[in-house]
Image (tube, rainbow, N blue to C red):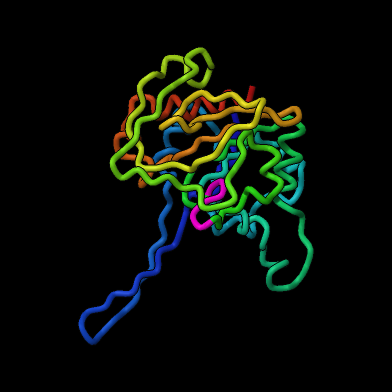
């Protein structure tokens, strides 16, 4: 399998106040390091595109996307794809990255969206995939408003479909600290639920497939227990194998 993994990176800018004086500091972080390592160890050939590189390095043609068996979008809002530098600063036209992804899936590609503050509709509705071409591709119906469900007490997903290739042999899940809430389209298949909400959903679009994972692949929503779960690598590899079939 060859996979394009997009997102899961951010820059934190901090202001430190110490009495009368203050100073600033900045740090860069990537949240998918452990997941990417697990996937590579599981035999997945990965190209990683951090959030800030989408502006420059996201493929400009369908032919470039077609070399991948699937695309993963994780915790990166739609604006990063749609408001590229040439358009935002120079008022120029560029290929619509989300339209390319839609066409890619329709022609037989796979798409996985992993939850987070800037996935699906997201915090303060800023991810806003609800109002993009990706809404047609995903097997879920996203909300118009902030779709986060915060669970500081912890919540445990439950497998509802044990015979699917993704969840076969996976029954008990570790706790999560939150997730994105959405409903499912009529032809979608729910494999896992959490508090009666869909958690892991599969579906088809055109000749391709799409999967939605409602929570995060890493902290904070993805708990330390999830990161250390015996099936952590297995569930992600299973999803990508399903998409590549």
Q: Could you say which quadrant of the image residue 221 lies in?
A: top left
**Residue 124 appears in the figure:** yes
Quadrant the N terminus occupies:
top right
Residue 192, how many percent across, how many down?
47, 26
Is 120 a magenta residue? yes
Question: If the image is split into quadrants, where does the C terminus sit?
Answer: top right
At horizontal 69% and vertical 32% (from top left) the residue drawn is 109
In this view of the protein, which residue sits in the foreground, 86 or 179? Answer: 179
Judged by its main secondary structure, the magenta piece is loop
Q: Position of residue 78 (x, y in %)?
A: 62, 54
Camera-side residue of 116 and 229? 116
- In this rendering, the answer to whether 31 lies above or below 141 is below
Image mark count = 0
Give the vertical position of 19 relative to 164 (above or below). Answer: below
Q: Is residue 47 in view?
A: no
Q: Is residue 203 left or right of residue 173?
A: right
Please name the residue shown 53% across and 27% down the image.
239
Which residue occupies 69% across, 73% down? 89
Q: Nearer the viewer, residue 215 or 6?
A: 215
Q: Is residue 148 magenta?
A: no
Q: Which residues are magenta?
A: 119-124
Residue at image position (58%, 36%) is 112
Q: Residue furthest bottom?
A: 20
Q: Residue 236: x and y, percent? A: 48, 30
Quick check: 155 left or right of 51? left
Q: Which quadrant of the figure has residue 71? A: top right
| Residue 2: quarter of image | top right
């Amino acid at each position: 399998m060859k996979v394009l993994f997009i997102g899961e990176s951010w820059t934190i800018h901090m202001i430190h106040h110490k009495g009368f004086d203050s100073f600033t500091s900045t740090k860069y972080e990537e949240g998918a390091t452990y997941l990417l390592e697990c996937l590579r160890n599981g035999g997945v050939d990965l190209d990683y595109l951090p959030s800030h590189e989408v502006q420059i390095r996201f493929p400009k043609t369908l032919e470039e996307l077609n070399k991948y068996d699937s695309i993963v979008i994780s915790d990166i809002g739609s604006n990063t794809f749609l408001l590229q530098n040439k358009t935002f600063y120079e008022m120029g036209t560029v290929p619509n990255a989300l339209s390319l992804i839609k066409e890619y899936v329709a022609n037989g590609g796979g798409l996985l969206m992993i939850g987070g503050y800037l996935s699906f509709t997201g915090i303060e509705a800023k991810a806003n995939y609800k109002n993009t071409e990706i809404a047609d591709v995903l097997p879920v119906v996203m909300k118009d408003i902030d779709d986060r469900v915060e669970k500081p007490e912890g919540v445990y997903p439950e497998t509802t479909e044990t015979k699917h290739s993704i969840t076969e042999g996976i029954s008990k899940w570790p706790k999560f600290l939150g997730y994105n809430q959405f409903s499912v389209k009529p032809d979608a298949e729910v494999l896992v639920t959490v508090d009666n909400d869909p958690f892991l959903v599969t579906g088809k679009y055109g000749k391709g497939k799409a999967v939605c994972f409602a929570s995060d692949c890493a902290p904070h929503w993805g708990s330390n227990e999830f990161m250390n779960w015996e099936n952590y690598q297995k569930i992600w590899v299973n999803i990508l194998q399903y998409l590549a079939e």
